[in-house]
Image: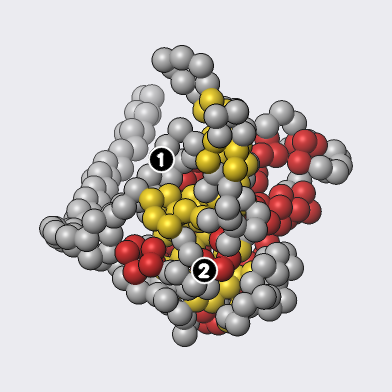
């Protein structure tokens, strides 16, 4: 008699599906209202010799991150020995700035040069073996993107200082740039002298958007009937944009104070800081 085949092996019991992880509780946020005063982010720009550094010495309890030795003619505190982009970031994150109320980076134009040198020295080409000899070595527009990102890291360092209650002033030189006009002919105007490619990666636009106040410091010039400019050496601080320059402000420090569109800037006059920082000389 033929033997019967063995019974089929019993199937293992189906394992129970793993329980789904509970969804994390949503983060709760507070709701606040009303105007909040605090540390400010300021851009100061203008032509060489107009007194940008002098103006910053009048800010509340200033300390200079002086990249061009522009403050050496003034009796102010400054960080000594800064030579590289990495030095700048180390200073902004370190304890040396703790005793001061206003941190001045003088100048952002020089900082951009340091950021460019840092990128060339540390950022490799996307293709192995390609030697980097300049910012154009990365290919069309790619080097400027690297510099833009490096500069943005410094602005993030500055934001951390602002959150700690310290004002930050970024000083830059000025340049002239063509302003597009959809309704007619373009014109020239003063703008901060920072990287400004045609399409993207504009450090100039990034800094202008970052700042709570962008102040243009310029010489007063009158135009004669013959079309010639004449100036007597007087200076003006502009807080609002005109066809001749870019500028902006988020208003005066104290509620109810009126923020003028411009104000004269005489030697030793730090009135602008009382308006936007609530103190100074």
Q: Which mark is residue 241?
A: 1
Q: Is residue 148 visible?
A: no
Work out whether residue 187 or residue 201 is closer to the camera in this orientation and state it: 187
Q: Residues within 10 Å of mark 1 (few under 14, many from 20)?
A: some
Q: Quadrant of residue 204?
A: top right
Residue 142, position as x, y percentages in the image: 68, 35
Q: Quadrant of residue 190?
A: top right
Is 78 placed above or below 149 here? below
Q: Which mark is residue 267?
A: 2
Q: Which mark is residue 45?
A: none
On screen, residue 69 versus residue 74, left or right, reads: right
Q: Mark 1, mark 2: which one is toward the viewer?
A: 2
> What's the residue at 26%, 41% (across, down)?
14
Work out whether residue 101 or residue 76 is closer to the camera in this orientation and state it: 76
Q: Quadrant of residue 189?
A: top right
Mark 1 lies on a secondary structure that is loop
Whether the residues at callouts 1 and 2 have beta carbons within 8 Å, the answer is no
Q: Residues within 10 Å of mark 2 (few under 14, many from 20)?
A: few
Which residue occupies the extreme top position in the image? 184
First along the sequence among labels 1 and 2: 1
The C terminus: image quadrant: bottom left
Is 146 placed above or below 25 here? above
Work out whether residue 93 or residue 34 is closer to the camera in this orientation and state it: 34
Colour pattern of the rendering: secondary structure
> What's the residue at 27%, 64% (across, down)?
253
> What's the residue at 38%, 44% (across, down)?
240
Is 228 placed above or below 183 here? below
Residue 276, position as x, y percentages in the image: 34, 63
Mark 2 lies on a secondary structure that is loop
| Cα–Cα span, label 1 and label 2 | 24 Å
Work out whether residue 228 or residue 216 is closer to the camera in this orientation and state it: 228
Which residue occupies the extreme bottom position in the image? 99
């Amino acid at each position: 008699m033929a033997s019967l085949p063995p019974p089929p092996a019993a199937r293992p019991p189906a394992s129970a599906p793993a329980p789904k992880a509970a969804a994390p509780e949503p983060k709760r946020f507070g709701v606040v209202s009303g105007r909040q005063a605090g540390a400010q982010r300021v851009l100061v720009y203008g032509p060489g010799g107009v007194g940008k550094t002098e103006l910053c010495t009048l800010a509340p309890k200033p300390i200079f991150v002086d990249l061009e030795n522009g403050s050496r003619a003034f009796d102010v505190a400054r960080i000594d020995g800064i030579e590289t982009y990495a030095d700048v970031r180390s200073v902004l994150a370190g304890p040396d700035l703790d005793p001061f109320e206003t941190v001045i980076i003088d100048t952002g134009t020089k900082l951009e040069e340091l950021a460019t040198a840092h990128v060339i020295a540390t950022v490799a080409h996307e293709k192995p073996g390609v030697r980097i000899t300049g910012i154009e070595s990365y290919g069309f527009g790619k080097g400027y993107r690297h510099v833009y990102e490096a500069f943005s890291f410094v602005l993030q360092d500055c934001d951390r200082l602002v959150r700690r209650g310290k004002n930050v002033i970024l000083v830059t030189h000025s340049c002239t740039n063509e302003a597009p006009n959809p309704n007619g002919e373009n014109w020239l105007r003063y703008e901060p002298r920072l990287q400004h490619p045609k399409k993207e990666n504009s450090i100039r636009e990034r800094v202008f958007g970052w700042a709570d106040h962008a102040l243009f410091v310029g010489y007063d010039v009158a135009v004669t009937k013959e079309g010639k400019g004449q100036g007597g050496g007087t200076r003006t601080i502009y807080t609002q944009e005109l066809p001749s320059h870019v500028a902006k402000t988020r208003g005066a420090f104290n509620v109810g104070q009126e923020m003028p569109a411009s104000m004269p800037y005489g030697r030793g006059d730090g009135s602008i800081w009382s308006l936007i920082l609530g103190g100074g000389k």
